[in-house]
Image: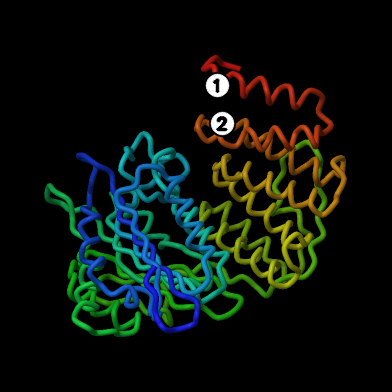
């Protein structure tokens, strides 16, 4: 913690430098950390007092997610500086940030899904989060980013560049972030837009895509705006923009079936101001990070309007759970459905309430789909506790759960 004389909430800067080791490494991401470490912490956050956290070549996506989640919960401005390598999951067509143990065949288990980052930052108040990236993308990720952009939630400022994999052998350098550090070390303190332009000019690279997205107006969700590196993008003339999300709804009518996992995003009755169709359309089009970020932003809006534990906030928690299912992330979906069930029980809804039973049934169903055994084992104790409180209408559900858990620990098939 770097302390200052100001009584305002300190800012937080999270520096992430991540890339696979070995021949799969396209960028020497960690080489930027000494340059950023030499920058006064206040320059990284724009606040007199600042907390700076570094993650150098992390191994486990859950570790990175936990750190992002912890910093996202902090008060005050949040700045994420990310140097790394983008890769595309061929099966799910989802972008991932490669970590130290990531390979093309293990990406789904060893890399950080980009939509996790989008979801965790989207719940923060609009205008309090800035993400600055210096990324290199492999061939498939490059095509994906060039055509669809690099989405984050509404109210998040996004600056930086994405470059294609270097044609020559060897890893690229995070020259954009190094240029930012050099400008700060010179004593200059330009605003973010000016810093972006100066750093992009110093870093060079005609093939790189530059992005800049300021804080959008209320009721909008904006993805990255793209131009070639020779013409910096401008938020006022986007080439890639996701559908606008209308003003918040105050009441959602939904029906659910207790035992069959269904699409929560499609259950709300439509209205002219209903955001569900746009969110569902984004998810069905494969833009899972955009859909998850929008749902998280609506959940945050309902939390501010109606408070924690409100039926409105719980509904959006359930929408997020179902969006994780559509993104084929059963671990996250299970976790969110369990949180929804716990929230309903905290509201003193009965264990045999159809909404409570439905949430637990869906959590159980998603847990059964998890192929990451450590993740399944980690979620199992909470699910077992819920199943004991909410046995549901399927006979023997708890016994089935316990048998599969035993098989996970023994290594024998269930």
Quarter of the image with the N terminus in it:
bottom left
- Say whether marks 1 and 2 touch (CB < 8 Å): yes
Up the image or down, 397 lies above or below 37; here it is: above
Up the image or down, 288 lies above or below 199; here it is: above
Q: Is residue 116 left or right of residue 317?
A: left
Q: Secondary structure at mark 2?
A: helix
Q: Nearer the viewer, residue 243 or 396?
A: 396
Q: Nearer the viewer, residue 354 or 233?
A: 354
Q: Is residue 349 left or right of residue 175?
A: right
Quarter of the image with the C terminus in it:
top right
Say which label, 1 or 2, has the lower sequence index: 2
x%, y% of residue 12?
42, 69
x%, y% of residue 274?
72, 67
x%, y% of residue 18?
31, 51
Q: Secondary structure at mark 1?
A: helix
Q: Residue at the top extreme?
A: 412
x%, y% of residue 126?
55, 74
Q: Residue at x 54, y 63 (%)?
A: 73
Q: How many numbered marks does the figure carry?
A: 2
Q: Nearer the viewer, residue 154 or 18?
A: 18
Q: Which mark is residue 268?
A: none
Q: Which mark is residue 377?
A: 2
Q: Which mark is residue 409?
A: 1
């Amino acid at each position: 913690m770097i302390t200052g004389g100001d009584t305002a909430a300190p800012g937080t800067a999270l520096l992430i430098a991540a890339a696979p080791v070995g021949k799969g490494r396209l960028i020497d991401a960690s080489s930027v950390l000494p340059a950023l470490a030499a920058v006064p912490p206040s320059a990284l956050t724009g606040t007199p007092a600042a907390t700076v956290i570094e993650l150098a070549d992390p191994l486990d996506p859950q570790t990175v997610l936990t750190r992002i989640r912890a910093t996202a919960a902090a008060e005050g401005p949040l700045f994420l500086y990310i140097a790394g390598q983008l890769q595309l999951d061929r099966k799910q067509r989802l972008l991932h940030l490669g970590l130290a143990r990531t390979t093309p065949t293990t990406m789904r288990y060893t890399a950080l899904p980009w939509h996790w980052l989008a979801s965790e930052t989207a719940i923060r108040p609009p205008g309090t989060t800035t993400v600055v990236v210096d990324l290199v993308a492999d061939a498939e990720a490059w095509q994906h980013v060039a055509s669809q952009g690099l989405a984050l939630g509404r109210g998040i400022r996004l600056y930086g560049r994405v470059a294609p994999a270097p044609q020559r052998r060897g890893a690229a350098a995070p020259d954009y972030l190094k240029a930012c550090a050099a400008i700060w070390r010179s004593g200059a303190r330009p605003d973010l837009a000016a810093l972006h332009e100066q750093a992009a000019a110093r870093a060079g690279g005609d093939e790189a895509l530059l992005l800049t997205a300021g804080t959008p107006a209320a009721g909008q969700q904006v993805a990255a705006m793209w131009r070639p590196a020779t013409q910096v993008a401008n938020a006022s003339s986007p080439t890639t923009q996701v559908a606008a999300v209308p003003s918040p709804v105050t009441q959602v009518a939904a029906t659910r079936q207790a035992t069959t996992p269904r699409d929560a995003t499609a259950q709300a009755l439509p209205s002219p101001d209903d955001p569900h169709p746009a969110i569902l359309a984004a998810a069905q089009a494969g833009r899972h990070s955009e859909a998850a970020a929008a749902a998280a932003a609506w959940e945050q809006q309902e939390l501010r309007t109606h408070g924690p534990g409100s039926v409105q906030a719980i509904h959006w928690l359930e929408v997020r759970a179902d969006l994780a299912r559509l993104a084929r992330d059963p671990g996250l979906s299970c976790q969110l459905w369990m949180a929804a069930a716990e929230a309903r029980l905290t509201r003193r809804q009965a264990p045999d309430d159809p909404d409570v039973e439905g949430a637990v049934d869906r959590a159980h169903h998603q847990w059964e789909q998890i192929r990451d055994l450590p993740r399944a084992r980690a979620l199992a104790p909470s699910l077992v506790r819920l199943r004991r409180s909410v046995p549901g209408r399927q006979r023997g559900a708890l016994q089935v759960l316990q048998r599969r858990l035993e098989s996970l620990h023994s290594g024998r098939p269930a």
